[in-house]
Amino acid sequence: MQEQNKATLEEPVDQVNNTSANKEILINDDNTENIDSTTDFADPLHDTKEENELDKLKTEIDLYKDKYVRLFAEFDNYKRRNAKERIELIQTAGKDVITSLLDVLDDCDRAEKQISNSNDIDQVKQGIQLVFNKLRNTLQAKGLKAMDSLDSEFDVEKHEAITDVDVIEKSKKGKVVDEIVKGYYLNGKLIRFAKVVVGK
């Protein structure tokens, strides 16, 4: 009898515990629903800040794009101008030298007339020698310098050997014994190799 009463008393306690647990679960479910529902609401201040930042970034992008376009156009103009100046420079590179040689050409014309009209060989020779000297002086003034190759050691950096010949003197072996074509420097830079004969 007492055991039956004990059993009946324990059952409602379990049921009460179960119902209280269910209430807790329902409360928790309600809370989660409330939390989720609050996050669904949009913050107008937050949206305005994002829009402002977006506008700022778009303005910066437009500014950099404009700078890039201007810079590209400027560089393109520079390339065209540079190419044009280079073509003009190539076309007129020898203008200065040619202008200075015109006086020598005039002297050549006068010497040619003198040769055809004069019978005095010595006078003709002197006239031609004057023209040659003027030509050399004009070219030297422009930076041209003749290379001294005779009796110097053969150097592949500035000499071009046409042939080699047997020499009696031992001191002339490996040296330039004859110069077929002169070598020249322009402002210290080699512009033509000397064509030479080398002793062996």
Image (spheres, rainbow, N blue to C red):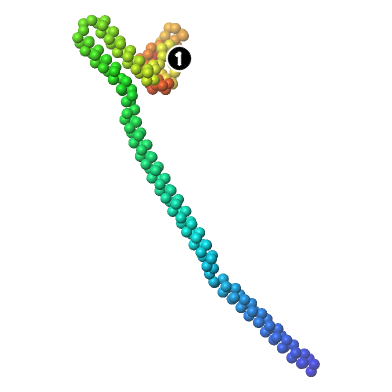
Quadrant containing the N terminus in the rendered view: bottom right
* Residue at position x 21%, y 7% in the image: 118
In this orientation, which residue lies closer to the viewer: 50 or 82? 50
Amino acid carrying mark 1 in the image: Glu
Can residue 102 be seen here? yes
- Kindly state the secondary structure of the residue where label 1 is placed: loop
In this orientation, which residue lies closer to the viewer: 122 or 25? 122
As drawn, which residue projects farthest toward the bottom?
A: 1
**Picture coordinates of residue 121 (x, y %)?**
24, 5
Query: In the figure, residue 184 lies in which quadrant?
Result: top left
Q: In this picture, is 157 found above or below 151? A: below
* Residue at position x 38%, y 45% in the image: 73
* Residue at position x 62%, y 76% in the image: 31
**Picture coordinates of residue 197 (x, y %)?**
39, 14
In this picture, residue 150 sits left or right of residue 94: right
**Picture coordinates of residue 42 (x, y %)?**
53, 69
Q: In this picture, is 77 found above or below 44? A: above
Query: In the figure, residue 43 lies in which quadrant?
Result: bottom right
Query: In the figure, residue 85 lies in which quadrant?
Result: top left
Q: In this picture, is 142 found above or below 30? A: above
Q: Which residue is mark 1?
A: 153
What crowding class fits label 1: few (fewer than 14 Cα within 10 Å), some (14-19), or many (20 or more)? some
Can residue 194 be seen here? no
As drawn, which residue projects farthest toward the left?
A: 117
* Residue at position x 35%, y 18% in the image: 139
Q: Number of marks in the image? A: 1
In this orientation, which residue lies closer to the viewer: 86 or 152? 86
Quadrant containing the C terminus in the rendered view: top left
